[in-house]
Amino acid sequence: MEFFYDFGKTLLATLRDVMPIIFLIVGFQLLVLRQPIPHLKRLIIGGIYVVIGLALFLVGLEKALFPLGNIMATQLSDPDFIYGTGKVVTQADWKAYGWVYLFAAMIGFATTIAEPSLIAVAFKASQVSVGTISQWGLRITVACGVAFGISLGTFRIVTGTPLYLYILVGYLIVIVQTIFTPKSIIALAYDSGGVTTSTVTVPLVASLGLGLSATVPGRNPALDGFGLIAFASLFPIIAVMGYAQLTHWYSKRKTKHMEKT
Amino acid sequence: MRWQKWYKIPNQFHTTIGELNILSIILKKIYQAFFDLLPIILVIAFFQIAVLKQPLPQMGEVLFGALLVVAGLTLFVMGLEMGLFPIGESMAHALARKGSLFWLLFFSFALGFSTTVAEPALIAVAWEAAEIAGKGGLIDPGKESLTQYAFWLRISVAFSVGLAILIGVLRILKGWPIHYLIISGYILVMLMTVIAPKEIIGIAYDAGGVTTSTITVPLVAALGVGLASSIRGRNPLVDGFGLIAFASLLPMIFVMGYGLIIFG
């Protein structure tokens, strides 16, 4: 019974998200474009699938994965687990948090693979590039970027170093990479930064950040808890451009090699 | 069906439609969704068993939830192909055919603004920002002034997303290279980070991430790709993407700008 209540509530929330889009599209079709929508029936069925699917997805996440992720984040960052029971620690030792970094990286990777927005963009990218960009290739690259970003973000929380330093350095790397990356991938790389931080990643990552900053000695959740999301959207850009550079360089070297022989 | 003919690509989703029956397509998609979720299951299982050495709490509930997630993802992906992508592209084609710049830009702005303004994540972040500002003594901590602060913050973020999609669409039309725009945006963010009040910076950075919802992203991606493929001289890969990048960059600039204006 409780499930149906939860599902109904989430379904209503999803519907509310879709409402402005429906109004906008219908309004434009009727008032501005004044022509029938092609394949209307198929579109409506597809729209219903999206809404019900998203609602099921969210309810499932809230029922199973979010509580579990939260419990694990608190357990892993618990000083008793990290320093051994009973020790009083006033100064955080960044070397003691190995499991936290690993957990951050792995959960970042795993949630990004399941991120529906990224699935959508990867699907489009592979369509448009006629298969040159493989869906899984893009998704794994982006997920590696998120994994590294969130891991570094937890390191920042543990050490308490200022957020803007990391972000500024990250931006500088992106700018330098942009100069050397094949032009065709740039727009997609920038986009992949925005799509990673959505339904699955944000709640889990935010609770990891807040939990960690609450338990690490000397950190304040209000000041240090933010910023993991910023890491999760910066590093995929670097990862995608880096991967493109790597494959570009590799294929160039290969053709050079073939010319020589 | 036109859009199947257009996209005959060797990937696991498309080639089989029409050749196999519906059931095997659905089974394939469920299998696919299961694979999408597998890493999360592995990570959680590994940490529970190997590191924390504890049994999973509420095993039944977790399994049921995972089942819902797989079913939801399956439906979502099916709906993407049937509904969201085609509607985004057919709107893009129709607007491009109509040839009115005003209506195209109006549609872009309205799409960005209307999908963001009521976004629950944004409402939560705006309220949080108001409370931090109230506690910090930057604004009057009364309820009315907090509500007003949160409201205008929300409006400014939604406005910035609308403007971002508009600029992105204009870029596709004109064929401007994206990196000049994005890099100047980054430089602006860096400069503003130096002068903006400390209390707003974390929120500004995170605001860029929360604005692009799961339904907006596919629609916006389809809009960009549809436009780029219906305008001569534009490449869907080079020019079609990038709208989401604008939508996550501009809110950062606007939130910091809002902080600068309010706090002086």
Image: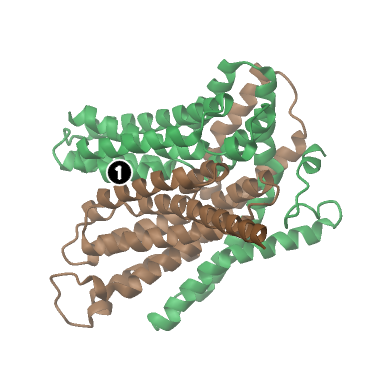
Chain colours: A brown, B green
Label 1: few (<14), some or many (≥20) within 10 Å? many
Compared with A28, B89 (above or below) is below
Q: Where is residue A94 in the image (x, y as percent from the top left)?
A: 24, 70
* Front residue of B42 and B144: B42
Q: Position of residue B173 (x, y in %)?
A: 58, 25
Whether residue B7 is visible to the viewer of this picture, yes or no, is yes
Q: Quadrant of the N terminus of chain A?
A: bottom right
Q: Which residue is drawn at 22% across and 83% down?
A: A85
* Front residue of B8 and B26: B8
* Front residue of B120 and B40: B40
Compared with B177, B49 (above or below) is below
* Front residue of A182 and B230: A182
Q: Is residue A37 left or right of residue A55?
A: right
Quarter of the image where one finds residue A72 = bottom left
Q: Residue at x 25, y 50 (%)?
A: A165
Q: Residue at x 35, y 69 (%)?
A: A101
Q: Which residue lies furthest to the front in this view?
A: A260
Whether residue B117 is visible to the viewer of this picture, yes or no, is no
Q: Residue furthest right?
A: B19
Q: Position of residue A259 (x, y in %)?
A: 66, 57
Q: Is residue A42 left or right of residue A139?
A: right
Q: Residue at x 40, y 62 (%)?
A: A148
Compared with B141, A255 (above or below) is below
Q: What SS does tag 1 mark?
A: helix
Q: Name the residue under label 1.
A: B203
The amino acid pointed to by label 1 is Ile
Q: In which quarter of the image is the C terminus of chain A?
A: bottom right
